[in-house]
Image: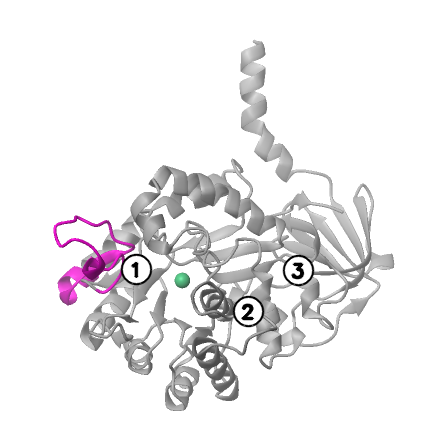
Amino acid sequence: MRQLITALALILAPALAQAAQPILLKPARVWTAEDAGPPHEGWGVLIRDNRIAAVGPAAGLDATGAEVIDLPGATVIPGLMDLHSHLLLHPYNETSWDDQVLKEAPDYRVIRATVQAKATLDAGFTTLRDLGTEGAGVADVSLRRAINDHLIPGPRLFVATRAIVATGAYGPARRNYSPDADLPQGAQEASGVDEAVKAVREQAGAGADWIKIYADYRVGPDGSTQPTFSLEELKAMVDAAHSGGRPVAVHASSDEGMRRAILAGVDTIEHGYGGSEATFKLMAERGVAYFPTLTASESTSTYFGGYVAGKTPPTPAMQAAERAFRLAMKSGVTIGMGSDVGVFRHGDNARELVWMVQLGMSPTQALLAATAVDAKVLRRQNDLGQLKPGYLADIVAVSGDPTQDIAATKVPVLVIKDGVLYRRP
Ligand SMILES: [Zn+2]
């Protein structure tokens, strides 16, 4: 009998967590991400079950039966999103990318990823689009399931599984190893329309929410970045993905790689460091969103390019990233928040927001990128990314006012995801 009760308690525990008492948040101010306006002083947010029940002047909110959480000096904002992450990677200055793929057991990588998912949620990032497991198979699908089943704490995940690269284009680069070595690869290789379409369908079948494709990589004879897939291959993959209801994210750093991806009809472009003005204008025209990954550029420059923050000038790679970001802003491209975290430490995602402001966005624009804009890219603008009645209760409180000082996003004091309180003052 006791065993039965224990078993029942285990089964019911997640359900009971959902039906917890209402929560009333009383911060200094609330920023809803409904528009670029300032935060509302003296407002509160009422949460019932896993949804936002009401948002407005705190005095007017019905707190009957609710747990009231005072957050003096803090600002309540929608849970932050980072739409370019790699939970199955860790910083390259700890272990090189090649060594992670070649020497770390997939099981070890998954265990690390669970810890990294918790660090992300604790940092106030309640949603990630995880763009490729980098050699860890389809482990992101199980990670998503374990989080959704409340087995481990972590952000909402939209996953891409293995990602698709042209044959011979990705890493570990075979030219760096014995030609006799049978090297695992960081993504699924494909060549020709048939194989490429098959790869899309295999990844969709394995549980991908998004399809991630590399339109270029360091394949030039001198190691330079060159386009990989043909326009025909890209178009076939995009059609196969879209026909199955999945959007497409494309890694592209070269202008030609970006151009082909845009013409093929992709949904988002990642990095874009070498994009020309004409190409960014084409992105704006076609409604392709841009994820600048500025912190990745800074991080690799720090690890391998001798960059020291505040002491050395930006490296050429950082200058290229800055140029692309400013060009995208000027061209009216939709810019979302995607950092490429994993290249740097999980939980440090807010560094990207600080960069976006440093390179010309207002703090409010950067916050919108990481909330309402990212939600729209995910096609979840009707239940995520804003603080509105009926929306899912993914909510963060940060110390201070992030619309004045974006660095406030580095100091989360409260984290709620799907109505569950994960971090409190
Ligand atoms: Zn990436």
State whether label 3 is within 8 Å of ligand 1: no
Outermost residue toward the right? 59
Task: Kindly report the distance in space between the C-alpha atoms of the residues bearing marks 2 and 1.
Answer: 45 Å
- Amino acid beneath label 1: Gly
Residue 124, quarter of the rendered image:
bottom right
Residue topped by disc 3: 410
The answer to whether marks 1 and 3 mark residues whose Cβ atoms lie closer than 8 Å is no
The answer to whether residue 255 is above or below residue 163 is: below
Horizontal and vertical percent position of residue 43 = 80, 62
- Amino acid beneath label 3: Lys
Outermost residue toward the left? 180
State whether label 2 is within 8 Å of ligand 1: no
Horizontal and vertical percent position of residue 174 = 20, 58
Q: Is residue 181 magenta?
A: yes
Residue topped by disc 1: 244
Q: Categorize mark 1 by other alpha carbons within 10 Å: few (<14), some (14-19), many (20+).
A: few
Outermost residue toward the bottom? 278
The answer to whether residue 404 is above or below residue 425 is: below
Q: Which residues are magenta?
A: 169-197
- Amino acid beneath label 2: Val
Disc on res. 308: 2
